[in-house]
Image (spheres, rainbow, N blue to C red):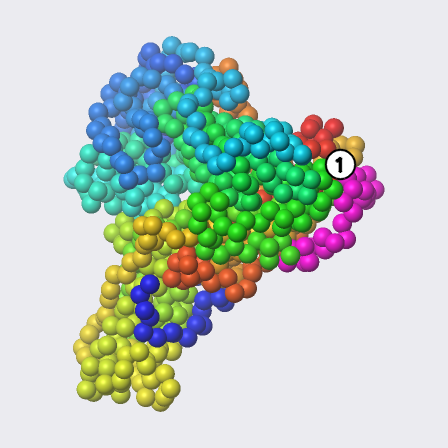
Amino acid sequence: MTRQPNRQPQKAVGTPQSRVDGRLKVTGQATYAADHDVTGVAYGVMVDATVGRGRITGVDTRAALDQPGVRAVLHHGNAPRLPYVDNPGSNNPPGERLRVFQDDRVRFFGQPVAVVVADTLEAAQHAASLVTVTYAAEPPSTDLTTAPADEPQRYARGDAEAAWAAAPVKLDLAFRFSRNHHNPMEPHATIARWEGDTLTLWDKTQWVVGGTQQELASVFGIPQQSVRVISPFVGGAFGSGLRAWPHVTVAALAARVTGRPVKLVLSRRQLYFGTGHRPAYTYALKLGSDRRGRLAASIQDIRAETSSYETFTEAVMGPGHMMYRTPNVRQAYATVPLDVNTPIWMRGPGYATGAHVVECAMDELAHELGVDPIELRLRNEPETDESSGLPFSSRRLRECLATGAREFGWHRRNPAPRSTRDGDWLVGTGMAAAVYDFGRAPAQAHARINADGTALVQAATSDMGPGTYTSMPQVAADALGLTMTTVEFRLGDSLMPPTPPHGGSMTMASVGSAVQDACDKVRRQAITLAVNDARSPLHRVNPDDVVVRDGRMHVKNDPTRGETYRQLLGRNQRDHLEVIGSWGPPEQSRYSMHAFGAVFTEVAVDDRLGLVRVRRMLGVYDAGRIINPKLADSQALGGMVGGIGQALLEHTVTDARDGRIVNANLADYLVPVNADIPDLRAIYLDGGNDQNADPIGVKGLGEVVIVGVAAAITNAVFHATGRRIRELPITAEALL
């Protein structure tokens, strides 16, 4: 690690700052993808396949083209051929990308088969309804439990089968998870404009450079620098914006053919077919232990849906790899190709599913042994990550469990199921541990000190809601010795320094560390200029002895001796000082790096109706350094809400006859609302600065806060009712 010449005073980091962009959002001034005012824009509306598999036999566009204002109707019969160059640096799963309008094949219900471009949105919508597409339909494959699987990924240590057979206590469990959809408030949207061979896209994306820019360059076979992507605000995404979906290509293709900028906004219904989903799973688990609850063996057989044309995988095996000390583990993870659109990561990807199984099984084992669930987890705390042999960069799960138990009042719990009533309601409490393997990746940032003493910092990262516009200036302000009001942070433009995907809990660790590096460097540049300037009060002072407070450089032990950035730059006739900073993790990590947590919840279940209500929930998190507690609360409570949806409400229903999603709307696909969320609270462990993880000591919070929530609710439902539910979501029918 590079030696820092001095330690700057910390004034902004760790304080509960309100969102810098909050006023723009609540007053409607934030410009989301569809909000940009692009001169001469036309409107695109896609026509979607109405069969789940087959071939297009005809496209009748005559009625649509006869409508006033319609400029074009594109489909596989008349669209230009596109290169679709390989894009190995993208987030695209292995396989063949969906090549829009390039052939007559239909791979899933809702696949784009045509686009209408018109002068107005209303004209485009009406004309799209007049396009007639005929098909040679085939029966789609949509059943995860019966379709053949691909060759599984495998992991093993020890001899799990023999150890399970010999274990005094055995569990043999089967879990099933419904498909979930992201349902962000802002629908996916793209505006595309060509100027010669240069393409500009205003797009809803979580990866400006490596995602939309790189993918569209490869689709059209043009240099990456010929594509500019602008995305200053993202209205929620939860993972759905981590790749450039076919509608982005459709917008760009329509703009090229018509010679006009084209705006294309997906309908709420189209989001269910066009922008991915958390895949459905079946997950079989055999768990063996001794009679004191010491785990001996774990055998996991996992099946997950993917599309027929790409193989999507996620880290679902992670929690079963390393969460608890288990000498004998065997895992098999098989994807099952179905006639669906390709899944994608959704908040807490992989871990939200895998940890649910592990944490529900631990609760079952605790009940079987008559051991408190917290005590069982403590008995199986590992010394190292047994899947890699590496020490944890930090692991404070014991502290999370102890703090949560104390604050939640766990000691008041009667462990017997069905032991507590409130009128017709059965009351239960449950808990689960949480874990997430937070990401880190190379990132760059630009920092500039202006002649007026203000600063500009920028990077190409996105912001889908965690508060990047606020947290990055907090890091920058402290590194530069400025107040937050004098630091501006800009993001969401591919002309800015490149950054990794805005997901996987990697933004603060990766981009934040690059911001820290850039601001440290430009601060040192200013100090160096001062100590070498014979006219400066700091002339010939050791640079290591200079700190900056409120824009004024001074000797650490003599605050009277110094000058401001503004005075220094003005005297030297400099408009600004600037630098590009960067950070990236080492190629070979010496640590296993995870965020941890413990979730406690109380539920009530109507004994006659089977309705489940969450009464209160507490999450305690070991997430490293907390840059902004107010933003952290927003992340934590939002993750808990998402976990409540996963546990009790969210369930995509598919008609097996044609692959149609029958509840592709917010009336029938249920998500939590305010009435479902009475009392949520989050606590972050103090002193969690994890310098083994990254220079600013953060471990990421956005993903771990959904992990374990559904398991805590499921375990609480068992405590209330005495019934084990191993399928999500938990429905009233399952409890009756």
Of 549 and 183, which appears nearest the observer? 549
Classify 722 as above or below 78: below
Q: State which quadrant residue 249 falls in.
A: top left
Residue shown at 22%/25% (left/top)? Answer: 80
- Residue 387 image offset from top left, x and y in percent: 46, 42
The residue pinned by badge 1 equals 721
Residue shown at 66%/42% (left/top)? Answer: 293
Magenta extent = 403-424
Q: What is the residue that sits farthest to the right in this orientation?
A: 423
- Residue 225 image offset from top left, x and y in percent: 20, 45
Of 88 and 69, which appears nearest the observer? 88
Magenta region includes residue 677: no
Residue 621 shown left or right of residue 496 in the figure: right
Please, what is the three-letter code of the amino acid marked with disc 1? Thr
Residue shown at 22%/31% (left/top)? Answer: 85
Q: Quadrant of the C terminus?
A: top right
- Residue 558 image offset from top left, x and y in percent: 36, 88
Classify 64 as above or below 374: above
Residue 305 shown left or right of residue 568 in the figure: right
For the question of whether residue 116 can be seen, the reply is no
For the question of whether residue 102 can be seen, the reply is yes
